[in-house]
């Protein structure tokens, strides 16, 4: 059990006015013991180590509520293409040739990048999640893992539920609770109604949640309309899919009644502005979702539709996108920061992360503000959203353990991971051709 | 006269296929002597220094075609406000209290940030441009400077032309030609028609160009419609404003005929996607401008409407914004890179920058690709647009002189500049209240 006393400008994300320009955070084991002005921590707290970062903002680690980590293997493999040729000619043939070991290395690369840009928790949906779980346990980060299930028939459905259940029993709450396992029905248009009903029952039986793509594109809306004569959210509601813990990725195309349903069933929305822009999906109605009381987090989506995993960039893009379609007052800096931290915690259903509060898990990052683009210092909130990039993060801690210091990763062999991914990605691409 | 041989992955921006994975660039004095595969440089070239950067992309320095450098003093001072209250209650009262010395330090901070994010040339419009010129000469960068002129009456117009002419005589072609002085009539809605005619004559007389805001907002369109019964571009054409070298910032609201006029008169457009999003100005018709043959560059606008000066972020946002309103095929990576380099060179009217070509000025940067977010390396073009940030730039050279190496600025006292700006900005803000 290590005790840390971390000093700097402390932004606890407990309210828009809460900020300690000369503050400190005490960490005892895996939890935050105290937060406040310098000197506020009780005199009987004996730090094993004092970390003095006077020019840094100490804030909660960022929560990436929707990604496909191992898709780093596809980064830059295919861009600037229309959706269907991109999927059919590029993404799917490539993914079909990925091995379990490839998934491990691709996930490890994503975790390197996430830590180096301030993300301490991710919600992941992909294949071979055992491999991703292994990488997360080694990295020391926090993750919610869902085996993505595309289910056109009962046989595929049985297999998906078996594998997801096995994943749950093997990894749920492993790593001092750092890993949670969810079910991952891919989307309303890629899974049968029968499977969506079954998976909800299984999730309820195990007492865990589900992660699903929802209302991402106009094509999805047209498909659901044609097949079931309704909209994606209403279709899921009619199946009894809601009621438990659900993380819905995207939520771009929603009418007022659907927003009401998401609020009523406490469905969390993972907003992915950069993916939505790059793939021309549209603009999610974030101000209306927030006004309705829906929990909204931010996500990067996979590296093939973004193409980085930098949540600071995502914050900036979230604000810009809403202001473009609305007014400059939409999605103010603090609201965006909240989506990336405390809002994300609501979406992932882990109440003890996303804020710096005594008793919460010690998941935090330090952002180096002693750089030209952070002067003058009128507003730390504005700077974090409109000027910061992931590369400004110098230190990252998860569960009370330092995983990065002075931008050096302490649990992951960054250079080896980069080399492995380079070789594997080139091998897969050669096989596709 | 120093000779450098710089080795790395060379991206000359002479065509989408032109790339030397193991290349070199020879620099003789202020110019590029040779570019090609390693070993391509003639045997009689004697480098004083070899700079070996095998994991870096060597590419042309970026050209920021529209900014207000000293507005770094306002960074984070006021955000998330509607346009008019933002200008009337925040920006203008603050600017009214800025001294010439403040402008110097604000400009110096902008130059620190620009070099640290790969920008080697800027087009600036602001007050007290003598001070900005001084900062540019010290920094060693390249700049086109225009005294911004808001002219409601003849008296103000006379003063603006006098001062601009004095600025021209004092600084045009100073610093081995690194500084160009333009005229800076602020916008069609802030200057009288008479002044716009006069300033065009003066620019012609001196043989220099003009920099103007044009068709930025719907409010501007409504104002011009009400006053003159036409649109901003047609209004300027009717005044005989076009024909010489004109850099038009924004160009958000343009119809097909106006795009044709811009092409016909060879007006360069400075596209500022992040400012246009943050201030809810709209989306400029970039694909249509490019299709019409209009020269389009990228700009950050000032730090109060962005809020950073990172041209890599601007490239990313340019692509995202167009894809959002169009299709994923719009504004492909190479096109965006071209806007930030060779396209920018066309806009600023300096044919010898923006590409790495023998005989061109040696304005170049090195981007460190040995980081997790740049793996695997399927496409350097994609990575530079969709994954790179300014902080990935390690080295910057302008006019054959190294201005930054390993992210250390060699001509600017970064820490002192940050401190000065902090004190001055806080002083000005206190005076406003």
Image (cartoon, coloured by chain):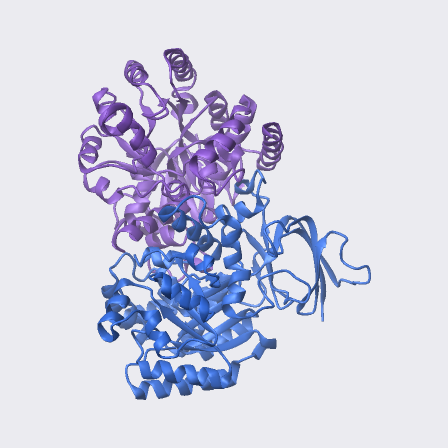
Chain colours: A blue, B purple
Tell me the residue at 44%/55% (across/down).
A314
How many labels, in total? 0
> Depth check: A387 or B252 in front?
B252
Q: Pick the quarter of the image with the C terminus of chain B.
A: top right
Q: Residue furthest right?
A: A44
On screen, residue B419 versus residue A37, left or right, reads: left
- Seen in the picture, residue B270 relative to B93 is either above or below; the reply is below
Q: Quick check: can you spot residue A405?
A: no
Q: Position of residue B296 (x, y in %)?
A: 28, 38
On screen, residue B336 versus residue B370, left or right, reads: left
Q: Quadrant of residue B301?
A: top left
Q: Position of residue B23 (x, y in %)?
A: 35, 49
- Seen in the picture, residue B281 relative to A367 is either above or below; the reply is above
> Depth check: A229 or A342 in front?
A229
Tell me the residue at 61%/27% (across/down).
B431
Q: Position of residue B151 (x, y in %)?
A: 38, 18
Q: Pick the quarter of the image with the N terminus of chain B.
A: top left
> Depth check: B134 or A301 in front?
A301
> Depth check: B178 or A345 in front?
A345
Q: Quadrant of residue A248?
A: bottom left
Q: Position of residue A297 (x, y in %)?
A: 47, 62
Tell me the residue at 54%/60% (across/down).
A341
């Amino acid at each position: 059990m290590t005790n840390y006393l971390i000093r700097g400008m402390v932004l606890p994300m407990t309210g828009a006015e809460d900020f300690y320009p000369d503050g400190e955070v005490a960490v005892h084991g895996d939890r935050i013991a105290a937060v406040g002005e310098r000197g506020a921590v009780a005199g009987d707290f004996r730090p094993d180590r004092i970390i003095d970062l006077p020019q840094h903002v100490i804030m909660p680690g960022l929560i990436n509520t929707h990604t496909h980590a191992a898709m780093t293997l596809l980064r830059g493999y295919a861009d600037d293409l229309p959706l269907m040729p991109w999927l059919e000619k590029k993404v799917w043939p490539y993914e079909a040739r990925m091995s379990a070991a490839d998934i491990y290395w691709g996930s490890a690369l994503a975790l390197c990048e996430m830590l180096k840009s301030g993300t301490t928790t991710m919600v992941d949906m992909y294949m071979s999640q055992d491999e991703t779980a292994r990488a997360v346990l080694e990295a020391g980060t926090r993750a919610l893992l869902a085996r993505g299930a595309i289910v056109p028939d009962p046989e595929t459905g049985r297999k998906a539920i078996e594998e997801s259940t096995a994943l749950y029993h093997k990894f749920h709450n492993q790593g001092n609770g750092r890993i949670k396992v969810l079910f991952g029905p891919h989307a309303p248009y890629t899974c049968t109604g029968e499977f969506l009903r079954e998976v909800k029952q299984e999730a309820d039986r195990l007492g865990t949640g589900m992660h699903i793509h929802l209302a991402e594109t106009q094509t999805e809306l047209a498909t659901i309309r044609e097949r079931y004569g309704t909209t994606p959210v209403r279709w899921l509601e009619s199946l009894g899919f809601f009621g438990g813990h659900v993380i819905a990725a995207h939520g771009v195309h929603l009418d007022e009644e659907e927003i009401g349903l998401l609020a009523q069933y406490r469905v969390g929305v993972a907003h992915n502005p950069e993916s939505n822009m790059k793939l021309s999906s549209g603009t999610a109605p974030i101000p209306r979702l927030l006004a309705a009381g829906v929990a909204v987090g931010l996500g990067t989506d996979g590296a093939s539709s973004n193409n980085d995993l930098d949540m600071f960039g995502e914050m900036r893009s979230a604000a810009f996108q809403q202001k473009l379609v609305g007014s400059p007052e939409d999605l103010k800096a603090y609201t965006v920061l909240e989506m990336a931290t405390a809002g994300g915690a609501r979406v992932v259903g882990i109440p003890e992360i996303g804020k710096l509060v005594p008793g919460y898990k010690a998941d935090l990052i330090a952002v180096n503000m002693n750089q030209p683009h952070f002067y003058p210092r009128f507003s730390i909130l504005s700077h974090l959203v409109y000027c910061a990039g992931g590369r400004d993060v110098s230190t990252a801690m998860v569960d009370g353990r330092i995983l990065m210091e002075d931008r050096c990763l302490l649990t992951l062999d960054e250079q080896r991971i980069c080399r492995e991914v380079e070789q594997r990605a080139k091998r897969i691409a050669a096989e596709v051709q």
